[in-house]
Image (cartoon, rainbow, N blue to C red):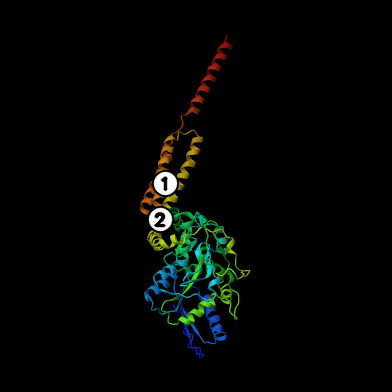
Amino acid sequence: MLFTAFQALPATGQTALENELVIISSHSKGILDSFKTAFEKYCQDTLNTAVSLKYSYYASEDCYKLAKEWAGKPKADIWWGGGVNLFQTATKEGLLLQYKCKDWGKIPGSWFGIPAKDTDGSWTGYAVSGFGFAVHLDYLKKYNLPEPKTWSDLLKPAYKGHIVMCTPARSGSTHMMVEIVMQGMGADPAWAYFRKMAANVGLFTGRSGDVKSDVDKGEHGIGLVVDYYGFESAAAGLPIKLVYPTDHSLANPDSIAILAGAPHPEISKAFLDYVISEEGQKLSMGVEQRGVKCPSPRLPVRADIALPPHLPDITKMKMISYDDKLANDRWKDINTIYETTIEKKHAELKDAWDSIDNAQKSISDTEAKMKSMENEGYDTSKVKAELNRAKDLAASALKSFDTGEYSTAKSSATKASDTAKAAIGLAEKPPPYATYATIVVVILVLVLALYYYKKKAK
């Protein structure tokens, strides 16, 4: 999708720089438009060069695919936006040009254990992205939902159908969120978590930007997003709040690189210089530069630049210990497993989880009825035995669900529910002790009455 048309501007005689710059990016139109305007002014005012910047939007995964497809003969100069993993992969494949921008030395080597720049300059972090939940405050109020504070909160039944997200295969930011939870919980518990959480997801979108749009419109109340989506919506006056989960969090450098074989390499280098400069970092943070204000504030990658009041200090957040090599090694596996066992089986997954939920409710209801009948003197020993069988079936269903065997999970859960419902019928009525007692009392009364009658007759 091409947002802005090429504008032919006259050259100023500056032969070292080209007059055109072409960018592919996963960033929002607001970010790209603000940098287009500011950079063109910067080139005119500072570099004495008339430059036309044009850009096209692609999801971060698609930017990588294009770079791979072009393989050294790209139709664009710069790839801008995405987590470091894709850029590291592209570096190994020789798809990126090595260039250390002017302020390269002011970029930290890493943020929270994640590299913030390539040691050879093949890619450079330009901003830091946290991840969390964009919540629509009016939506939550309408449905009487609390704000989620942790990843674990998203499992609550109250959120069923109220969550929207993209998938890791279509979004670098979503992939990073999945990896964060993977490393925070451990792989097996995390996969079990994501399957349960998916049962509460109302919609999987085609790209991460669609999650933002969905929540902005109030179509769902909770969206899994990169933090600046939430900042942008709040800055626009929408009732949106960005919540960083307190149980598993991390901040990830968002990257930029010049494609190997770029048709306009010199102006590409100038753009990287600008993005990492103090002016470029402030523009990115939403601080006005050259009459332009970026509507989507970002946290800076440079630690030497003060934060404006509207951005949080994420250095004080509790972060997981991140293993970059592990994340790279299983990048494709995570995308494939999520797509094949969760997204493509979403309807089957939800059906199985509903069956498990119904089984748990049936067991709970039968336990409550059993307790009441015990108070009335019923013999419930056979009920307890069947309930234990129902619980074993429910546990088996949950185990199958956690490993993605949804049809088996549904079958076991249905048997568990049926077993629990039928169990209450096995309760045995108490012996009629009350009736026996009444008869005994009546007999005693009659005997006593007869005794006194005969005694009186004498």
Residue 297 placement (x, y as % from top left): 57, 71
- Tag nearer the camera, 2 or 1: 1
- Callout 1: helix, strand or loop? helix
Are the residues tagged 2 and 1 within 8 Å (C-beta)?
no
Numbered badge on residue 351? 2
User: Which image quarter is the N terminus in?
Assistant: bottom left
Work out whether residue 106 or residue 51 is closer to the camera in this orientation and state it. 106
Which amino acid type is marked by label 1?
A: Ala
Give the Cα separation between the discs numbered 2 and 1: 17 Å
Q: Residue furthest top?
A: 458
Residue 38 placement (x, y as % from top left): 55, 80
Q: Which residue is mark 1?
A: 395
Which amino acid type is marked by label 2?
A: Asp
Residue 43 visible in the snapshot? yes
Mark 2 or 1, nearer chain start: 2
Name which quarter of the figure residue 422 lies in. Answer: top left
Work out whether residue 54 or residue 352 is closer to the camera in this orientation and state it. 54
Q: Residue 295, relative to residue 353: is it above or below?
A: below
Numbered badge on residue 291? none
- Callout 2: helix, strand or loop? helix
Residue 268 placement (x, y as % from top left): 48, 80
Residue 206 visible in the snapshot? no
Residue 113 placement (x, y as % from top left): 51, 62
